[in-house]
Image: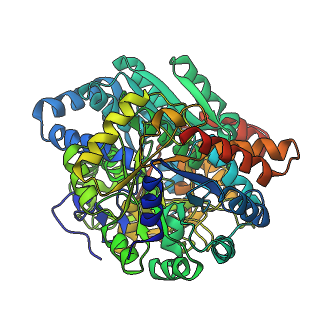
Amino acid sequence: MNSNIARTFINCKREKRAALLTYTVAGDNTKNNSLKILNAISKNADILELGFPHNTPIADGGQIQESSHRALKNGIKLKDVFQIVKKFKNSNPDKPLILMGYFNLIYQSGENIFLKNCKDSGVDGLIIVDLPYPENKKFATKCKKKSIDFIQLISPTTSDDRMKKIIRDSHSMIYYISMLSTTGGKLKVSPKKILQNYNKIKSINRSKNIVIGFGITDKTVSALKKADGLVVGSQLCKTITNSIKKRLNTAKVLNKMVYKLKKKII
Amino acid sequence: MKIKKGKLLIDQHDKNFMYGGKFGGNFVPETLKKPIDDLTKLFAKLRKDKKFLKERDKYFKSYVGSPTPFIKLENLTDYLKGAQIYAKVVSEANGGAHKIYNATVHCLIAKKAGKKFIVGDTGAGYAGKMLSMAAKKFGLKCKIFMGAKDIKRQRPNVEAIKKNGATIVPVTTGSQTLVDAVSECMRYWVSNCDTTHMCVGSTVGPNIFIKICAWSTAQISRELYNQVKEEFGKIPRKIKLLNCVGGGSSAIGFWNEFMDTDAEFVGVEAGGPKNSNLHAAPLTNGSKIGILHGAAQYVIQNKEGQIGSTESISAGLDYPGISPLHCFLKDAKRARYTSANDEEALKAYQLVSELENISPSLEPSHAFHEAIRLAPKLKSSEIIVVNSCGDSIKDKDIIKQKLGSYQR
């Protein structure tokens, strides 16, 4: 049987469009609000990435750092993250949700306990920023056994040989990092060049779903809509920051933003 | 867990770059895999390259000023009436601290890699000062990441960095100290690894940076080994090598050549302010293993895995983690670790500066405290050597504020 994630890509392909993936941070700016945001944006987002915040991130840009900082300041713990996921999945069982974060939190929980919590709350996939290939092989196998998609990352610096190995050992989805940057950087590579790299990955195994992330905003999203999926993260975190400052309803504002993004790729 | 004899400590890792199966590794984003791999290959080649070694030795001699003095602290020894106390005055190296070794080697490597830009982190400001100095010498453009709190408390080094023409990037996230500077520097490298070489300021971070740093600071013990032999005719059986540890680069360099001897290694961590729970002593205070800056190590953190805040009077030791090499040495029982608090370090600085012609900075003053504590309990046939790896001049402001006046 196909996973929720794989099924979503099949549906999007049937509609001849890219999947829209969003990234927000669990607990930003409160537990309730982040759940409300997920519920609101899930109408237009195809796959939801939810960050579990870490206070020493080595690959996040300013916007996501700010969101994580807010969440941690509000005392967010892993058990809250799983609660948010559980509540969300109770009302949206078919909507894929991917947790994203740094390995130390998993290491401290213990891999097996962490994965059990993922399974119990309904997590569909995992992206671990600082657990690269091949060090992640053992953990990825554990995920597979629990029917959780472990999402491998490929970057512009990944060599051809390495790329082949990563793809061979990947599950249904692969995350292509568009450029050398932390999250939220300005897109410094032309969409044409990004799609060239994307096609190279795709040509190695067409059955894998490749999503592109980093530097994707409402300004750049349509130029890349040929991809299987596109991830918008920092722009959403920034929108949350701004709407908090203006005392607006964050869920509503985010919903509008995601709607706008979706319209640009259909 | 055991240290193998006859093999360099830095090379005692498995295929996943883990020491003792538990410490180190490369927990890095995918983007950094290739640059780290390239650097690993380049360094493996260079360290076997006779021409490169000759070049390194030439600069260590003519530029760093090797060998640094090895002196007996006669007055302190007489005062404490116990073991004979010696100091390896590494603060006499060009720039005033051991950080010059790592900085010089990184600049040489950056040149070989064809990189024109170099970036680095700094806590006490020494790593930044030395990197900016070496970058200037070797014609590289340099950026230094430094916590905003450290910029305020380490003014003399900040001025030196600027004078060397480097850009200082103040880091205002988190605790605004070394831990945040390292994170920010790594984030910068993620975005610029195609044009820029990164120098990690201590024996921390992804494996290759631990290796390069320890390989560079090993110069300290290469010199010391000969100096000790000359002084005593052999390596004495009862000799203790005392060194402060923050990230742990000076201690590793100080101990390296003595690994297979009977010398006892004592590492002294920063205990922080007296009666405070905030400290930077993960090895002494039983911290758990966690991942910080790309490597598994004992690290101050909460139950969830969020990295904890630290506090120390010495910016250079104010770091929640510790080199995986020290974790390895601790678990293999090759070295033992203890801590000194802020007040003890200050007192040690005061006593040494009063009695002797050297004036250690607050970092080695932690190690001097342990020497002062131990010496009276030991026989006069026993020998203590302290690595005086920094000069107090950089701590002038803090010392004045704490003690009312500053003497050097």
Residue B380 seen in the figure: no
Give whichever of B108, B399 is nearer the camera: B108
What residue is shown at x 51% (from left), y 17% (from top)? B165
In this view of the protein, which residue sits in the foreground, A234 or B222?
Answer: A234
Residue A45 seen in the current view: yes
Q: Position of residue B355 (x, y in %)?
A: 58, 45
- Front residue of B302/A21: it is A21
Out of B343 and B309, give the one closest to the viewer: B309
Q: Is residue B244 left or right of residue B108?
A: right
Rendering coords of residue A259 (x, y %): 67, 46
Residue furthest to the right in view is: A247
Q: Establish if A194 lies above or below B7.
A: above
Residue B202: horizontal and vertical position, in percent?
43, 46
Q: Tell me which colouring the rendered structure shows.
A: rainbow
Spot occupied by residue B50 in the image (x, y as percentages of width and height):
11, 34
State left or right for residue B50 relative to residue B359.
left
Drawn side of residue A118 relative to residue A53, left or right:
left
Q: Quadrant of the C terminus of chain B?
A: top right
Q: Which quadrant of the rendered structure holds the N terminus of chain B? A: bottom left
How many numbered discs, if any?
Answer: 0
- Tell whether A77 sits left or right of B323: right
Q: Residue at x 60, y 45 (%)?
A: A262
| Residue that appears at 54% across and 32% down | A220
Quadrant housing residue B163: top right
